[in-house]
Amino acid sequence: MRPEDLQVNLRPRSPWEAMELGTALLRRHAAAVWRPWLLAMVLVFVLANAVAWALDRIWLGLLLAWWLKPVLERIPLYVLSRAVFGQVPGTLATLRAQAGFCPGQIPAALLWRRFTPARSLLVPVDLLEGNAGERRTARRRAVAAQAYAQAVMLTLVSMAFELVLALGLVALVLLFLPQDLLPDSLRETGQALARPWPAWLKLGLNLVPWAATLVIGPFYVAAGFGMYLNRRSGSEAWDVELAFRRLRRRLLSHGAPLLLALLAALPLAARAAPPAPAEEAADPAPTLPGVFGDQLQEDTGFLRSAAKAYRDPLLNRERTVVRWRPRQAGERTDPKVPDWLGPVAASFAMIAELGLWLLLGLLLLVLLFTARRWLPWLRARIGAAPRAPRDAMVEVAAGVAPDVLPEDVPAAVRRLWSTGRARAALALLYRASVEAMATRARIELPPGATEAQCLRAASALAPDAGRTVFAHTVRAWQYAAYAGSLPDEAAFEALLDEAVRCWGWRA
């Protein structure tokens, strides 16, 4: 079989696309596959159930037929493996060829490889490549490297389709029953199932799953064969080889006349060419000095640049390798150790180990007694929340509760400002303005109200009744609290005087 005889378009495909390629190949050669498949399946079913009838174990017929499925699946694989190269075998030729189609693989297929979940992908490796021993194992591993999971999924999906088809055949019987007689028929069927089953019913139940296998089996084999073709094409680059072969044929078909013309013109070209002078036979002298003169020999900068370029490891293939070698060649012999040195070394080792343990215990005691000093630092380093800077806290006058305003608000604000606590002064001015605004607007603010909520509450006031002054105070506090921008002395005094006149604060 040659790759150029392939009847499919080889290209890189995913395993799912490769399954579709196999089913398309099956649809193209459906008659050549199903005729021998149907004959073999019917023959095996009859023989298996005949043996089971003779042993008075009808259920054994279905088990034997199911166990022989890997042998029967060789028939669709044989047909597809020949049809993909353009050689479709006939029905009788396919059945006759099964006796010589790798008979040595039948015991393995029926015993230790019977329950392989990726059987559809790995059986072509055993039957079509002719390898043996470790080479076959390596090939199975290479083919299943990137498609094993998809092959297992194919097996599960095929089993699900067989189950659905079998249940559908059972339900098909119920469709032929009249609706009026359906309840009585189901009741009588249940009573009949409780009694010993007749032989014809057991044979019918054996036939249902076997018929489902008869339909789904070739699709299962064809999908696995498509994945096998895809994996082999990818590992052996069949598509690249075929592309080069097509290119060679195209070049030969178009380039043969041109090649003949060139061969015919070669004697004429040789006759018309003048004889070469004797001096041209020798190696030509370098032309670089003729162009640049002696300037290259005198230009030391150029010579240094050229030497540096040649030292570049990308241009210079030479490299220096340093190896250490013993001065005296030959085998090294270890010096003989005196017998008394062993116990001495063991004693020193035990003392050193004891000293290390004592040092470790001393270190742990030191860490334990100094934990108060280094533990807070370690917590801060690990990621504990940093403590807020002192300037970021809103300070109030000593002895005054945070929720209680001082009696003389302007004096308290100026006192904080004069002592350098400008942010605390603006915070006190803002808090006093919020309470004054809420009292004048006759509203009750929620605890922890934000600046935006306070501004919305102040919108109930008229501009000359305090809304504008309150907005100025809120803006000054926001600049100080969130942007760190404090007003100058004049702006602070103007803001405080404006608030005193608006809210009527007096000492």
Image (spheres, rainbow, N blue to C red):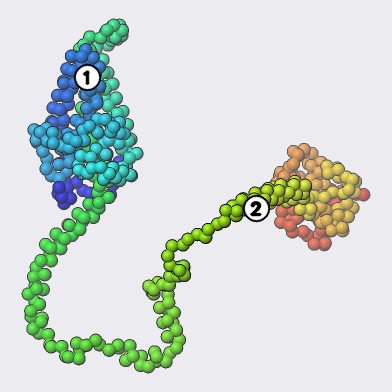
Residue 255 visible somewhere in the drawing = yes
The amino acid beneath tag 1 is Gly
Q: Disc number at residue 14?
A: none
Q: Residue at x 27, y 26 (%)?
A: 162
Q: Residue at x 12, y 88 (%)?
A: 274
- Quarter assignment of residue 210: top left
Q: Nearer the viewer, residue 344 or 420?
A: 344
Q: Nearer the viewer, residue 495 or 16?
A: 16
Where is 244 relative to 379, above or below?
below
Residue topped by disc 2 = 348
Pinpoint residue 439: horizontal percent, then vertical percent. 81, 41
Pinpoint residue 382: horizontal percent, then vertical percent. 67, 49
Residue farthest to the front? 339
Pinpoint residue 27: horizontal percent, then vertical percent. 18, 37
Name the mark nearer the viewer: 1 or 2.
2
Q: Nearer the viewer, residue 454 or 279?
A: 279
> In screen coordinates, is 326 left or right of 273?
right
Residue farthest to the right? 507
> In screen coordinates, is 39 left or right of 144?
left
Where is 180 relative to 479, above or below?
above
Q: Disc number at residue 61?
A: 1
Q: Residue at x 7, y 75 (%)?
A: 264
Query: Counting other residues with Cα less than 10 Å from the Cα at mark 1, is it few (<14), some (14-19), or many (20 or more)?
Result: many
Spatial CA distance of label 1 from label 2 is 80 Å
- Answer with mark 1 or mark 2, whichever residue precedes in sequence: 1
The amino acid beneath tag 2 is Phe
Query: Counting other residues with Cα less than 10 Å from the Cα at mark 2, is it few (<14), some (14-19), or many (20 or more)?
Result: few
Q: Residue at x 13, y 66 (%)?
A: 255
